[in-house]
Amino acid sequence: MVPDRWTPDLKAEIEWTTDLETYQKATVSIPRYNEVGSLAVHFLRNGQVKVFVTNLILGHPDYPLTGPEAPMREGENPVWEHLRRPLES
């Protein structure tokens, strides 16, 4: 859950594991947001953790993760195809 209003000192503490034995932790600043939404957490290829608040889903054309950090490795696609299609009326 994120606060309704962003403050400059807002941070998230992220803990994760890839083998259930060794755990890692990172404290990262949450970038400014104007509208409350979900906290998105991305583990980048370079080992960094990126977080931001968004109301968009991964795969949306305006999703905040862009540039060289955004592409998935070939064969990886966590977004279901039906989520990429516009809603039918």
Image (spheres, helix red, strand yellow):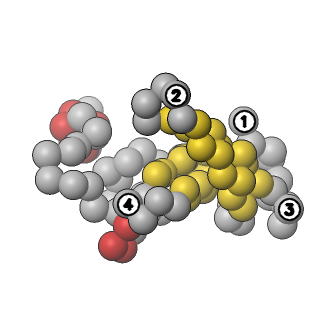
Q: Nearer the viewer, mark 3 or mark 2?
A: 2
Indicate the secondary structure of the residue bearing disc 4: loop
Q: Amino acid at mark 1?
A: Met
Q: In the image, which disc is placed on residue 89?
A: none
Q: Looking at the image, which residue is at 80% across and 46% down?
A: 4
Lower position in the chain sequence, tag 1 or tag 2: 1
Q: Looking at the image, which residue is at 62% across and 39% down?
A: 15
Indicate the secondary structure of the residue bearing disc 3: loop
Q: Nearer the viewer, mark 4 or mark 2?
A: 2
Lower position in the chain sequence, tag 4 or tag 2: 2
Q: Amino acid at mark 3?
A: Asp
Reading the image, the residue beneath label 4 is: 45
Reading the image, the residue beneath label 3 is: 9
Reading the image, the residue beneath label 1 is: 1
Reading the image, the residue beneath label 2 is: 21
Instruction: Name the foreground residue: 69 vs 46.
Output: 46
| Relative to 66, 40 lies left or right | right
Mark 4 Cα shell of 10 Å, populated few (<14), some (14-19), many (≥20) = few
Check the image and report above or below for 69 versus 75.
Answer: below
| Relative to 62, 1 lies left or right | right
Q: The N terminus is located in which quarter?
A: top right
User: How far apart are labels 3 and 4 at the CA level?
Assistant: 26 Å
Indicate the secondary structure of the residue bearing disc 1: loop
Q: Amino acid at mark 4?
A: Arg
